[in-house]
Image: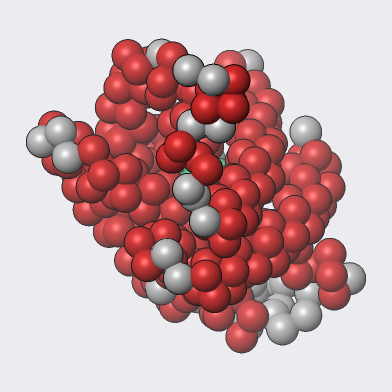
Amino acid sequence: MTTSTTLFPPEKVNIPYATRILTFAATAWLVVATVGQWLFGLYILLFYGKSALTGDFERWNNVLPHGYVEGDWKGNTIVSLHILLAAILVMGGPLQLIPAVRRHVPRFHRWLGRLYVTTAIVVSTAGLIMTWTRGTIGDTTQQISISIQALYIISFALLTIRSARARQVARHRAWALRLFMVVNGVWFFRVGLMGWLLINGRPAGFDPETFTGPFLTALSIFTYAIPFSLILLELYFFARTKQNKALSLVTAALLFLCTLITGIGIAGATMGMWLPRL
Ligand code: HEM
């Protein structure tokens, strides 16, 4: 084998230039999103985890209107499960998508995969119970939208396990990515909201007291009920299958734009929401 064939295996040489840009754009988004997810995970561990360890659950009420309710042990257990297990999802999700982890520690990937899927189902079910029994901030549209998202999460989690058990690798990968997108709906919502506040410098298009208004209605519909992230993922799958140069470049441009917006949102959420609460 010559040096040139070692360095540039044939399959790499033949990858069209537009597809490489598309892969690069998707990787750029994933790297930025991973940083943002882990910051959210750190916030969950340092704020909720630490106060749970010290038994100071009342501190949760500084940020959650329906966090800890004196005497309601059932409701409090559900809220605790929901929030503390959420850390597994935000910390573990990006790890599942790193190719080197899958390649070098496949047993860890399988173990974390089972934990992730089970946790996603438990956290969403707890979220549904919290939304419809304890109430939450926002209006009915927001509650219906996030409930639809819970149904996506539970269905995609089951489809991810089914395809893995059937050893349908391509299908498993697609369902796992769809699951990752919907599990992160709550993260997209926070990042979208805080990015919007950072850009506008004030709560534009909604009332911060009632947490309602056209901006929040649109944000909840397009992050939860009709998730934009899922539409973009399907476009990415389509562009990769079609191998059409123009389509790949347009999709890559959209992904670069989303990377920028995601980065702004992460900065807004970290500075405006997560850091001040610690
Ligand atoms: C599966 C991914 C999810 C994660 C990672 C997650 C994470 C969280 C976190 C960290 C909080 C605490 C709020 C904060 O400090 O920002 C929270 C609160 C909450 N979540 Fe989730 N969540 C998820 C899904 C859901 C779903 C699907 C629902 C509803 C169907 C839901 C309903 C709620 C409710 C009602 C609260 C309390 C808000 C309040 O008291 O007003 N969550 N969630």
Which residue lies at the image location 10% right of the left edge and 36% below the top edge? Answer: 166
Task: Work out which residue is located at the far left of the displayed protein and give it.
Answer: 166
Q: Quadrant of residue 194?
A: bottom right
Task: Work out which residue is located at the far right of the displayed protein and give it.
Answer: 201
Residue 272 seen: yes
Residue 124 seen: no
Horizontal and vertical percent for residue 105? 41, 14
Name above or below for residue 164 compared with residue 199: above
Horizontal and vertical percent for residue 132? 35, 61
Q: Quadrant of residue 67?
A: top right
Which residue lies at the image location 74% right of the left edge and 60% below the top edge? Answer: 260
Name above or below for residue 48 compared with residue 186: above
In this rendered view, identify the residue nearer to me: 93 or 56. Answer: 93
Which residue lies at the image location 22% right of the left edge and 53% below the top edge? Answer: 155
Give the quarter of the figure containing the C terminus. top right
Horizontal and vertical percent for residue 59? 67, 35
In this rendered view, identify the residue nearer to me: 139 or 155. Answer: 155
Horizontal and vertical percent for residue 205? 72, 83
In this rendered view, identify the residue nearer to me: 173 or 182. Answer: 173
- Determine whether, in the image, residue 166 is placed left or right of residue 260: left
Q: How is the image coloured?
A: secondary structure
Task: Work out which residue is located at the far front of the displayed protein and give it.
Answer: 2
- Determine whether, in the image, residue 195 is placed left or right of residue 85: right
Which residue lies at the image location 64% right of the left edge and 21% below the top edge? Answer: 50
